[in-house]
Image (cartoon, rainbow, N blue to C red):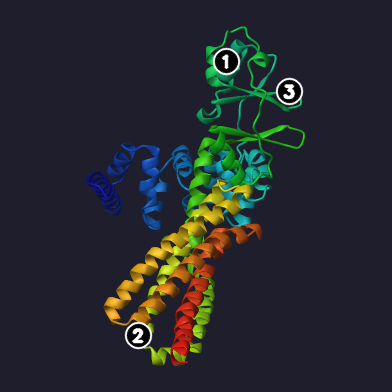
Amino acid sequence: MDSANIEAQTEVRGRIDKFASLIDTRDWQGAFVLLSQLRVADEAGLLRDLDRERAREILSRLSVSDLAEVMEALPVSDACRFCDLFDVDTLADVLDIMEPDHVAQVLRELPVKQVGDVLALMEESDEVSPLLEYRRGTAGSHMSPSFVALASDMTVDGAISALRAQKPHRDTVDALYIVGRKGDLRGVVTLRQLVLASPRRRLRSLMDRNLLFVTPDTSEEETARIMHHYNISSLPVVGSDKSMLGVIKLRTLLHLTEERATADMYHMANLSEAEGFTGPLHSAVRRRLPWLAISLGMALMSGLVVSAFGSTIATFVALAAFLPLVSAQGTNAAVQTATIFVRSLATGELRPLMIRRAIVREVRLGLINAVAIAGMSGIVAYVWMRDIFLAEVLALSMFLTMGLAALFGAVVPVILGRLRTDPALGASVLLATVTDVTGFAFLLGIATLAARLVTA
């Protein structure tokens, strides 16, 4: 970590401590002066780091419009945590000011009764309620119903006048959508095109008819892939009749990408993306304990393999020192390969036609690494134990374990993906077990076979 990052973190930590101190001394004027010096995103970050009671003290003194700005700047999980600090009337007023797509994301995480109570009091519930009907993980669940729709027979001058009258949100004016009388999507015009075009030119002659769009049921992964691949800042969502329903905005894309990356990272460790330092302890136990129990069961399989070769270990006690070495190298090799495949599958970079070629490449790479590591392991074993037999056994078992680990690391995520299971979720447990079992079996099995051949 460079000195600039250390200084920045020290400054943030100092700001949090000062803010907490002002709250504890009930110096509200000083606290709000400090907040006023920050951008909304930094203000939200500061409030996010406060404990529940201090956050309640500050939030209860903010105006509804300020609360709405802070809530929109927070990740959904933190926004939901703050929802518990408001009464239902205040929460409804705050959500009425926020963007509908963000409101829908927040409400999806709240208890059903609380959602019903809030929607009953919201003035803008008609815009939010339809969004709640779409399945999680789809484009419909992330789209915003706020977009600029213009008629194709409008002139450029008329379109600019319409924009001034509508006063759209800043992140909805990059792309302006041309729709028919029934609301069906006909084309798209960028704000740049509109500004540079002749005032009397009709939008029908200016619009791009080569449209990119998704339906409400399109997966969020495919939606993000399209936006990344074509480098677009917004993507229309249309119904079966091509009627314009909403748009996926750049802000949503960034959130989707971050959430997907976080989920994959957590799943590789068999954790839920809901994990954090602020959630209830019993919820964390309920999410983590089952996976730990599964890991225990898988580990017992490795123990059974070792116990089956008890006589071999009794004869060659030094083999016990090599068991963790083979296990660790096999797991590392498998996880390296699996990480590449999990990410590539999640981003759409690894397409179906590429899978076989990618597996072959990774296996070849794994074998090359296996040769190098096996050679080094054999040399280390000989220098350490002064026993050529043990060195050869370790080198051969290391080569086989790492070669097979590369194959499993490539194949397991692909199989899980085809079974409609998140490749990141079960890969780590399966790979750790497979590499342990095969590594122990190779090491002890080769030693047993070699000893029989020598004594025969």
- Is 113 placed left or right of 424 in the picture? right
Image coordinates for residue 71, horizontal then vertical, percent: 47, 44
Rendering coords of residue 298 (x, y %): 53, 77
Q: CA distance from mark 1 to mark 2?
A: 81 Å
Compute the Cα span from label 2 to label 3.
Answer: 79 Å
Mark 3 and mark 1: Cα distance apart in space: 18 Å
Whether residue 402 sits left or right of residue 317 in the image: it is right
Numbered badge on residue 160: 1
Nearer to the camera, 76 or 264: 264
**Relative to 122, residue 393 above or below:** below
CB-based contact (under 8 Å), mark 1 and mark 2: no
Residue 412 in the image: state x and y as whole percent.
57, 63
Which residue type does callout 3 highlight? Answer: Gly
Q: Which mark is residue 318?
A: 2
What's the residue at 70%, 14% (across, down)?
Answer: 153
Near-viewer residue (180 or 298): 298
Numbered disc 3: secondary structure: loop
Q: Earlier in the sequence, mark 2 or mark 3?
A: 3
Which mark sits nearer the N-terminus, 1 or 2?
1
Secondary structure state at the residue bearing disc 2: loop
Q: Is residue 153 above or below residue 125?
A: above
Q: State the residue position of label 3.
A: 180
- Counting from the top left corner in percent of width and height, residue 195 is at 53, 14
Please identify, in this view, whether the residue under mark 1 or under mark 2 is nearer the observer. Answer: 2
Q: In the picture, residue 35 is in which quadrant? A: top left
